[in-house]
Image (cartoon, rainbow, N blue to C red):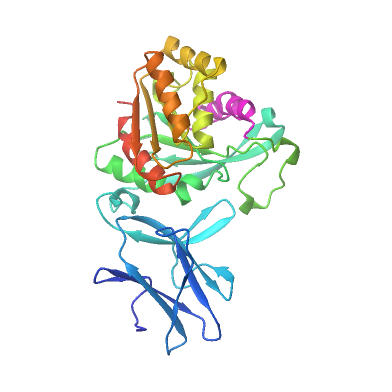
Amino acid sequence: MATEEGYPLIRDGRVTFRMEAPGAGRVEICGSWDPEHWVDMQRGGDGFWYHSIPTPTPEIYSYNFSVDYNMTTDPSNPLTQRDGDRVMSMLMIRGKRSEDYFDCPSKRGTLRYEWYPSPTLSMDKRRLCVYLPPGYSFHIFRKYPVLYLLHGGGGDETAWTSMGRAPQILDNLISKGKAVPMIVVMPNGNTFQRAARETGLPEEKEQKRPWNMGLFTKSLVKEIIPFIEGKFRAIPSKSCRAVGGLSMGGAQAISASGTYPDTFDYIFPLSMGSKDSDWARERLQRVKKKGYALYWMACGKDDSMFGGACNLDRMLKEERMRHTFKISEGGHTWDNWRHYLDTVVPLLFK
């Protein structure tokens, strides 16, 4: 079964995985196509272990091996994803749903990491990731709208690039003419971090309270936006700003748009909702009073946040605020969040 072809090997309706471990007593695999189960791989006569599955539906999947109960990525596969402290190998299955997740063969945007001061969080520098659309460095007189894209709990400023495939999605949508060229800013929403843990920078443990919503949204509006509009050719107006995010980032998007209703015209919380409280209703009423161009939300039926999302949908209806609520299959997972981003980006700044 060992060949010179690369692994994972996708052929004849099946995907075959291979792991070299001649001295191992047990090798297992667990993938996001069946995340609840570790499955034994079969020992070959060549020092390799094998396992095959029917080719799953088009999407991006993650997986790891366990060699004698020691977890590892696939050494034969250079494609990996990092979600917080977890690193996983990637299995990419092409198809209509996933076509925008692959690298765009035409013009591509660029990614930059930038450091900005945050007096709000008592930090001299914090890191964020910036996507600049194709042609940004050539069209030197052109200015662009900006999407502030927020990660979920356990993520950081790299989550939407590593797990979410945001650069590929933007490249493909812009290349196809489905989305307007835009700058995308992906900050670190953890108020106790200066940057992702991979940088090795110390964390401020005393600020590690649940989400620190008010501090982050203040930093977003009062520090990050002025930094971006001062350093890049961003259009400094509400009509050219969007804010959205998944889970924790969705809550931060709801908070930022309601606390600072003069700031964002496009709002999209993903896999997040709200309790019916005076605070929540007041924030929605502020958004309504100041006006907005788009309020778009999405959640999976099996998502733990589905009840809260339905509650937010109900409050928006009761406040007579036009909005869209996309209900999908599945749960609190990246296959939904990538799809939501691919769906909502074409609606921005139109």
Q: Toward the viewer: 183 or 275?
A: 275
Q: How many marks?
A: 0
Residue 103 shown in magenta: no
Residue with the most extreme bottom position: 45
Can residue 345 be seen? Answer: no
Residue with the most extreme right position: 206
Residue 227 shown in magenta: yes
Q: Toward the viewer: 164 or 48?
A: 48
Range of magenta residues: 211-232
Residue lying at 75% horizontally and 37% vertically, measured from the top left: 206
Can residue 221 be seen? Answer: yes
Image coordinates for residue 205, horizontal then vertical, percent: 74, 41
Residue with the most extreme top position: 289
Asked whether, in this view, residue 143 is left or right of residue 255, the answer is left
- Magenta-drawn stretch, dominant element (helix, strand or loop): helix
Q: Is 108 located above or below residue 278 in the figure?
A: below
Residue lying at 52% horizontally and 24% vertically, measured from the top left: 275
Q: Quadrant of the C terminus?
A: top left
Q: Quadrant of the N terminus?
A: bottom left
Q: Is 46 located above or below residue 82 in the figure?
A: below
Image coordinates for residue 168, horizontal then vertical, percent: 36, 48
Image coordinates for residue 300, horizontal then vertical, percent: 39, 40
Residue lying at 59% horizontally and 72% vertically, measured from the top left: 69
Image coordinates for residue 101, horizontal then vertical, percent: 34, 50
Q: Is 99 located above or below residue 213 in the figure?
A: below
Residue lying at 41% horizontally and 78% vertically, measured from the top left: 50
